[in-house]
């Protein structure tokens, strides 16, 4: 049972948009920045978003992040087959004094 | 080029010990917090431990506290995870990761390829 809650899966056709939610509480998302990671099968995770909505160099602007209250959302527009992967949200939890992740969301491109 | 290379994984019996290493290159190692994150087969990411740049501050997940010890050797550009009293539930791929370096939070911008630890009799 993960501290942060994500939907197990989302899917859409190529070119469409998907949104992945990440729900937490005041001890984590509510008072800390959120990051997002992409993990292609068999590979290490890759940082997509940090500080809620900032993208590292090299991450296309098709990926976006937002936060409101105790929830965060990752958006992917112009969906491509290469976007098929698991996506994880993460943040610091003040009560647990540690980093917490969501359970992951599998994105399928139909 | 930034590189992180883990080693030391393998098969160990319950109650046994293992030391993982993560050798890094391509950046000023002593300036960055380093982390260990694990992933059980078919499961999600779980934070394990972290250590600051000079090795004086460490944190652990409750599930490993008292059993695992993180350390670093800045002269060797290497971070370690000493794992004792291993349990079946510690079976996972263990990744080391570098922190992005912002004061605002913990963001992992570089990851190693992971090393598999299997705890089984």
Image (tube, helix red, strand yellow):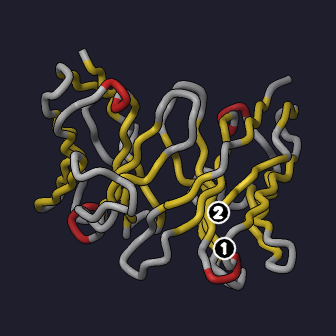
Q: Chain of mark 2?
A: B
- Is residue B58 positioned above or below A89 on the image? below
Residue name at image x 66 percent, y 36 percent: B92
The chain holding disc 1 is B
**Residue pointed to by mark 1:** B27
In the image, taking residue A29 as reference, residue A58 lies left or right, namely right
Quarter of the image with the C terminus of chain A in it = top left
Residue B73 in view (yes/no): yes
**Residue positioned most to the top:** A110
In the rendered view, does A30 fall on the left or right side of B108?
A: left
Q: Alpha-carbon distance for marks 2 and 1? A: 6 Å
Q: Residues within 10 Å of mark 2 (few under 14, many from 20)?
A: few
Mark 2 and 1 residues: CB-CB less than 8 Å, in contact? yes
User: Which of the two labelled residues, at mark 2 and mark 1, occupies the earlier sequence position?
Assistant: 2
Dot 1 falls on a residue whose secondary structure is loop
Disc 2 element: loop
- Image location (x, y in percent) of residue B107: 44, 64
Q: Quadrant of residue A25?
A: bottom left
> Which quadrant would the N terminus of chain A be assigned to in this image?
top left
Q: Position of residue B35 (x, y in %)?
A: 61, 62
Q: Which mark is residue A84?
A: none
Query: Around disc 1, counting alpha carbons within 10 Å, would you say few (fewer than 14), some (14 to 19), or many (20 or more)?
Result: few
The answer to whether residue A23 of the structure is visible from this angle is no
Q: Residue at x 85, y 53 (%)?
A: B19
Residue situated in front as seen by the camera: B63 or B27: B27
Q: Residue at x 14, y 33 (%)?
A: A17
Q: Position of residue B52 (x, y in %)?
A: 63, 78
Decide which of B17, B38 is in the foreground and name it.
B38
Give residue B2's mark. 2
């Amino acid at each position: 049972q993960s501290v942060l809650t994500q939907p197990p899966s989302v899917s859409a056709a190529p070119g469409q948009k998907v949104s992945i939610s990440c729900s937490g509480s005041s001890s984590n998302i509510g008072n800390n920045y959120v990051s997002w990671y992409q993990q292609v099968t068999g590979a290490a995770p890759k940082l997509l978003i940090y500080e809620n909505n900032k993208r590292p160099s090299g991450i296309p602007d098709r990926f976006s992040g937002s936060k409101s209250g105790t929830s965060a959302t990752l958006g992917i527009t112009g969906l491509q087959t290469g976007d098929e992967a698991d996506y994880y949200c993460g943040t610091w939890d003040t009560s647990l004094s540690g980093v917490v992740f969501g359970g992951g969301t599998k994105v399928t491109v139909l | 080029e930034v590189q992180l290379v883990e080693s030391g994984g393998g098969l160990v019996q319950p109650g046994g010990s293992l030391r993982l290493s993560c050798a890094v290159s391509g950046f000023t190692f002593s300036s960055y917090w380093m982390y260990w994150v694990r992933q059980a087969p078919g499961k999600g990411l779980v934070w394990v431990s972290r250590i600051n740049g000079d090795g004086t501050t460490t944190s652990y997940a409750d599930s490993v506290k008292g059993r695992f010890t993180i350390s670093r050797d800045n002269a060797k550009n290497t971070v370690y995870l000493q794992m004792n009293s291993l349990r079946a539930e510690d079976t996972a791929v263990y990744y080391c990761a570098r922190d992005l370096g912002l004061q605002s939070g913990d963001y992992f911008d570089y990851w190693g390829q992971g090393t598999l630890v299997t705890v089984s009799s």
